[in-house]
Image (cartoon, helix red, strand yellow):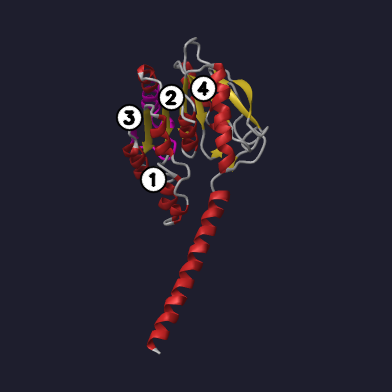
Amino acid sequence: MGKTLVLTRLTSLAITLAVVIVIAYGFARYVRANGMFFPEKYPEGMWDTRFDVAPQDVTIASTDGVKLHGWLFRATKPDAPLMVFFHGNAGNITERAAAAAELAKRGVSVLVFDWRGYGKSTGTPSEGALYDDALAAYDFGAKIHPDIVAYGESIGAPFAAYAAKHRRVRCAIIDSSFPSLMDVGNAHYFPLGYFAPRAMRTAAWLNDAGVPVLVMHGKRDDVVPFPLGVKLYQSLRVRKEMLVSEKAGHCEIEAMEPARYYDAVTRFIDSAKSSPAPRPRP
């Protein structure tokens, strides 16, 4: 009788555990599919383009025919590198335009584009499709200038790292991001991050790319907690630097400490010019 009772309880516990795992897995998949992208479609945003450096409208064709809209801010220097700006999961390019124009004034051309479903871009955002968008934006930019800097902001960072792994870049700049989706998932929904062990592997892909990396993070970041930025930095096995802001929250260093931000970004890009170019990976 005792053995039967124990067996019954163990079976019940196993069934309960299995149900909990299935529910947790389903919730993790739901969050991954529906809780990562918050686009602002045109006319939402600040579409006044009266900047010190006037942007050029560009259209980028992704591999499945989706049309991505972007702005190209050209620096006056003929040998200026081109930054491809992979922005985060909210808003659209209008929120990044002022920084792009300022970088162009300082000698770095910038291509900032909207993911599918954002701004004036067509389509609907999804995790898988954004990898195609990232490579399409890189390939478009490389036709303008082959000397590319990959800039990844927040959730745009893993896509920037993916492009850096599969294409040739001078360096990568990572703003307010995380080592992997597993890490950021566990930070917000522990232990659901373990259901995405190989997704958005920012640190691993940057190591594969083998290029210099500048990591930037604010200590007051409540979206991607500062310790994740530190973990990303510590996970890198490439030439690296880290810019830490005591004042900034999520993606706020440019606004809170503009002098430090622009000096760090432009200096790092210049310093990476002498680094040996890695072989792009398949």
* Label 1 secondary element: loop
Mark positioned earlier in the residue sequence (4 or 2): 4
* Label 4 secondary element: strand
The residue under the point 42% across, 52% down is 186
Query: Could you tell me how far apart the alpha carbons at marks 2 and 3 are, in whole angstroms?
Result: 22 Å
- The image shows residue 252, relative to residue 37, as above or below, that is above
In the drawing, what numbered circle is on residue 241? Answer: 3
Mark positioned earlier in the residue sequence (2 or 1): 1
Left or right: 186, with 109 as reference point: left
Mark 2 or 1: in front is: 2
* Label 3 secondary element: strand
In the drawing, what numbered circle is on residue 89? Answer: none
Mark positioned earlier in the residue sequence (1 or 4): 4
At label 1, the amino acid type is: Pro
For label 4, the crowd category at 10 Å Cα-Cα, with few meaning under 14, some 14 to 19 and many 20 or more, is: many
Q: Which residue is mark 1?
A: 225
Query: Could you tell me how far apart the alpha carbons at marks 2 and 1 are, in whole angstroms?
Result: 33 Å
The residue under the point 33% across, 29% down is 240
- The image shows residue 15, relative to residue 189, as above or below, that is below
Q: Which residue is mark 2?
A: 279
Mark positioned earlier in the residue sequence (3 or 1): 1
At label 3, the amino acid type is: Glu
Query: Could you tell me how far apart the alpha carbons at marks 4 and 2 are, in whole angstroms?
Result: 23 Å
Query: Could you tell me how far apart the alpha carbons at marks 3 and 4 are, in whole angstroms?
Result: 21 Å
The location of residue 98, given as percent across then percent down, is 51, 26
The location of residue 221, given as percent across then percent down, is 40, 42
At label 2, the amino acid type is: Arg
Q: Tell me the quarter of the image containing the N terminus.
A: bottom left
